[in-house]
Amino acid sequence: MMEVVKPVVLSTEGLVAGYERDLPIVRGVDFAVRADELVVVLGPNGAGKSTFVKAIAGLVPVHSGTMALDGADITAVPAHEKIRHGLAFVPQTENIFATLSINDNLLLAADILPKERRAGRIAALYDMFPDLSAHSSRRAGQLSGGQRQMLAVARALIVEPSVLILDEPSAGLSPKIVAEVFARLKEINAQGVTIILVEQNVKAALAIADRAVILVEGEIRHEGTAEGLADDPLVAELYLGVRHDRAEVSP
Amino acid sequence: MNPQALMDGLIAGSMIGLGAIGVTLTYSILRFANFAHGEFVAWGAYFALAVAGALGALFSGLLTPIGPFSFGWALPIAALIAIVLNGGLALLVDALLFGRLRDRRSSIIIMVMASFGAALTLRSLLEFTFTSKPAYFTTALQIAQPLGGGIRATPDQLLSLGVAAVLVIAVHLLLTRTSIGRSMRAVSENVQLAGVVGIEVRKVIRIVWLLGAALACVAGISAGLLVQIRPQMGLDLLLPLFAAAILGGIGSVPGAMLAGLIVGLSEAFAVQLIGAEWRAAIAFIILVLVLLLRPQGLFGRPE
């Protein structure tokens, strides 16, 4: 049976971005994600992975190039409007409002929805994350690392985004919690949310991803299926920090 | 000791508290100490004075005192108009000065220095327009009524206290129970994340200016009603406002009000106990003590 090629949801063309105009960190990235894909962005430290997704989220100035979401150009859309276009972003650190309650964190995200949809969406997210529902009036700052990530993800999902971007959700978490968080992300992806994941935790990320791109010095150097990249010893050793037996690596 | 100091302190404290709420909101959301905030207190009073004067000249019936109070309907109507004008002034200062510096990502110290410049300009403009001669909403004498326990208060004083209490409760409810309040708390905690979740930070900043200017205006009108209106009144309030905002804990509205009352009462008791010449030193002593002993203030979070 022929596999149906899903439409591109998010794409960038020749994207150049960085905090300073004369110091671009992302240098001409062409990137496309299809509906329902889970794509992981990998690369060594300082490769510009975070800057790349932050630029898509509107948090880092774009110097040139374009980006489109569901066919609409969103290059000049300010950060606070991107969520209204269906692009949700979960930053790496400080991704929840620690001084607000769990419920207030979700209410805040729901504020951009029409009034009649807010309660329903919050209830749906509490169903999805019963842990949060049990402590809804607790200050978010009192949550454990894993629960914080779940709250950040729940907060991002409130508006039913078409694309969810996560910047290193495994940072600072124990391997057991990382496995739980990633399993959750895979479930969310299976429910039809396209996910872009920036990760340092290569093994765990490739295990759940459909596809991976490897960013080096602000450019995409390799891309392919997650399985293919995981099995490529040269790519693994050079760019992903995964150690293989020396004899397997050609010079 | 004369128990009347209690009433004097509460009245002065409620005005300080209203001003300190503006300082604490600006500090927590715009992240700089706005030394021009006291000038909004003074401008608020002068806006009300000018509008009430104009209304009185046009419709003399509006000057007839309402019930037990010393003023006619001209003043409450002028107060509402002055609140709008003062909010407009705050937005104008932000558009001309602070907003431009924010867009350039200026450091906090530049914002603070700019606020000193704004304070000087605003104060000089007041002196230029209204002269430095003290002005009054009314020169009618009010008899203070005994309230028991040796304490007396005029109807104007009781009204000022009541208005301050209602406003503090209203602002507290706005911050804790409404979506705009949630947005303000979110911006105060993490401005970048606030943008990511869809909050328009510029809009929140405008609301903070409007709210701060409105409360400053009410404080200025109270000061004008109970004491007098002078271009220097903002400068005189600067230290008490900051002492109260820091004692209350940056970002805490009830904290700013409670601390305002503490500063006002401390000043009033100091006048009784050690002499009127020490009044101005009290706010400074409180400020230094809080910074040394409990920098996060009464309701603030430790850094």
Image (spheres, coloured by chain):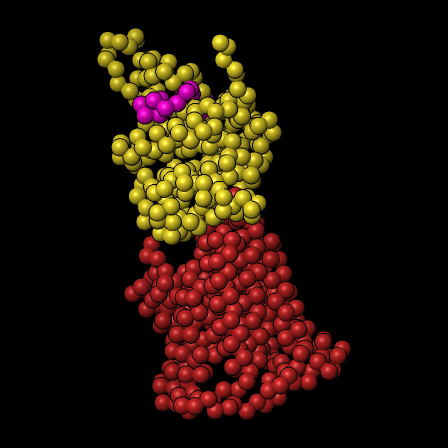
Chain A painted colour: yellow
Left or right: A235 as drawn, with respect to A23: left
Residue A223 seen from this side: yes
How many marks on residues? 0
Q: Colour of chain B?
A: red
The residue closer to the viewer here, B129 or B65, is B65
Query: What segment carries the magenta color?
Result: A203-219
Question: Residue A69, position in %: x, y?
Answer: 56, 29
Which of the pair B152/B273 is nearer the observer?
Answer: B152
Residue B190: give x, y in percent of width and height: 43, 48
- Tell whether B98 sits left or right of A41: right
Residue depicted at x 52% and y 16%? A5
As displayed, is residue A31 above or below residue B89?
Answer: above
Give the quadrant of the C terminus of chain A: top left
Q: Where does residue B12 sit, x and y in percent of width and height?
A: 47, 78
Identify the residue shown where x is 43% and y is 66%.
Answer: B254
Q: Residue at x 46, y 58 (%)?
A: B176
Q: Position of residue B214 (x, y in %)?
A: 57, 65
Q: Is residue B137 magenta?
A: no
Asked whether A233 or A103 is in front, the reply is: A103
- Reply yes or no: does residue A217 show up in magenta: yes
Q: Would residue B27 be visible to someone looking at this image?
A: no
Q: Residue B263, located in which quarter of the rendered image?
A: bottom left
Does A187 sit above or below residue B197?
Answer: above
Determine whether B154 is above or below A224 in the image: below
Residue at the (38%, 82%) spot, across then down: B269
Of residue A83 and residue B135, the one placed in the foreground of this image is A83
